[in-house]
Amino acid sequence: MDEIQIVAVVWKPQIHVSANNSYPNLSIYPRGLGTIPSLSVTCLTSSTTKKLNPINLPKLTLLLLLLLLVCIWRAVLVDADSSILFLDWTVSYSERAPLGVDKQVIVINDQFPGPLLNATTNDILSINIHNNLTDPFLITWNGVQLRRNSWQDGMQETNCPIQPAQNWTYSFQLQDQIGSFFYFPSLLLQKAGGGYGAIRVNDRQVIAVPFDQPYKEYDILIGDWYNADYRDMRASLDDGNSFSVPDGILINGFGPEKAIFDFEPGATYRLRISNVGLKASLNFRIEEHLLLLVETEGSYTLQQYYSSLDVHVGQSYSVLVTAGTSYYMVASSRFIPFQLIGVGIIRYPGSEPYPITPLPAGPQPFDYTFSLDQARSIRWNLTAGTARPNPQGSYHYGIINISRTLVLENGMLKDGKFRYTINGKSFVHPDTPLKLLDFFQLSVDTVPVTLPYAPFAIPPALGTSIIDANYHDFLHLVLVNPLPYLQTWHLDGFNFFVVDMDWGCGMRVRWNNIT
């Protein structure tokens, strides 16, 4: 995957001191923007006090006002460590056969997976999307918080779709975030056709990372793959059918033993692993290598070794691996009737092209306890900073006041189509996105209904359902899955802390502090 970046402006306030016959002059201006003056203030010297201070304020007060003025001006500038990245992406079809069967794959700039989105905390991104598909298109930035800017989220309730032969530019800042994420198409089951790619949000140089700098980083996108066209799959769901078993597992868009990763003996690598599939949870492992977990989706974790990791749909993990010799990399399916295996190759200079050892074994396909125990074992690193120098553990979230408790239960509705529900409601998209109706204060064409705060014994039905909440509220969410198979939830655009998980449908009074 090739990285496409254009750094347009690095905006740093500079102080220029000059002098004239009366008093020295301080000018603060953005570097790199030519001769654009932005602020002129006067030094507080004894010879100029009367000119500056006609109302005889104390010098300390004047100095504080000056500092406040500089801070306010500094706040309106781009952060000193930030860059503006302009990206131009063309989304189109390409005939490819990742598993040996030809299929129209969705590519970005002719790449599958799409280009790496590599940025740093507080960078500003401007991504111009050209839609050369025959269908409308939106792309969403999984894990990027888009604080107070949800209109850039790329979901059907926040954006109008980009129509065929049209373009649209996403503009947003990676504010106060680090971590490993990915982007993907959010409309019309297009994710089954590709169009996804990795996101890296790197730490600023002033932030101490809680591990030594790795020799190199790899983004590893694992996911199930269907040979069927996404339009045919969507039509099958509309006919009332459920998803079939996937046809295989891809690693970075490649079928078995096609994804090659070049390692140097003894070097340490950071692997950013994301499950970009539709349905299957995957177990990731490397033969005779331990995985040192260091980060998950923007949070540094207590560093623990794992022989393998379950990565559920939508999840991302960062691990450190110290290289040895050529070995297999495996991603195998979990909790589906037939086990599918994706295989990559770690290759060293002068090594044999393919390992001669058998594939490493993983957990039993339906061992749910293994997956639950893994989730319970992951803890926050409370002494490490992330986007800011202060440690993650200094935020004192343990003393928050819960505003409301919502119990959200997923279910099913069959009305000739295959639908899922939350608390008995299956969502219907209005003609105009709800967020745009709210932002522009437009009249509603579909009257939304408030989602019940808990599941009730009512028949499931269609509806444009919403959850009302106040700004800065803390909500206690209880997610309940009564269905006989694993369900993945995507809770978009918020910070969530998992405080408990267990079997059954009840709420526990005492949390076990999984965070």
Image (tube, rainbow, N blue to C red):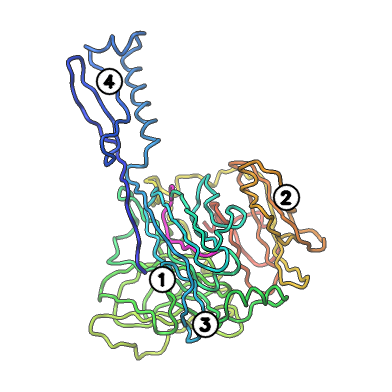
Q: Nearer the viewer, residue 19 or 308?
A: 19
Q: Is residue 291 above or below residue 168?
A: below
Q: Earlier in the sequence, mark 3 or mark 4?
A: 4
Side of 374 relative to 217 (left or right)? right
Position of the N terminus, as image quadrant, is bottom left
| Element class at badge 1 | loop
Q: Quadrant of residue 305?
A: bottom left
- Residue bearing the label numbered 1: 111
| Element class at badge 4 | strand
Which numbered disc covers residue 445? 2
Percent coordinates x, y for residue 446 in the rendering? 73, 52
Q: Nearer the viewer, residue 147 or 87?
A: 87
The amino acid marked with disc number 4 is: Thr
Circle 2 residues within 10 Å: few <14, some 14–19, many ≥20: few
- Residue bearing the label numbered 3: 248
Q: Is residue 84 above or below residue 417?
A: above
Q: Nearer the viewer, mark 3 or mark 2?
A: 2
The amino acid marked with disc number 3 is: Gly
- Alpha-carbon span between mark 1 and mark 4: 54 Å
| Element class at badge 2 | loop
Percent coordinates x, y for residue 291 in the rendering? 39, 71
Percent coordinates x, y for residue 18 in the rendering? 19, 25
Give the residues in magenta. 174-185
Q: Are marks 3 and 1 in contact (CB under 8 Å)?
A: no
- Alpha-carbon span between mark 1 and mark 2: 39 Å
Which numbered disc covers residue 42? 4
Q: Is residue 192 above or below residue 169?
A: below
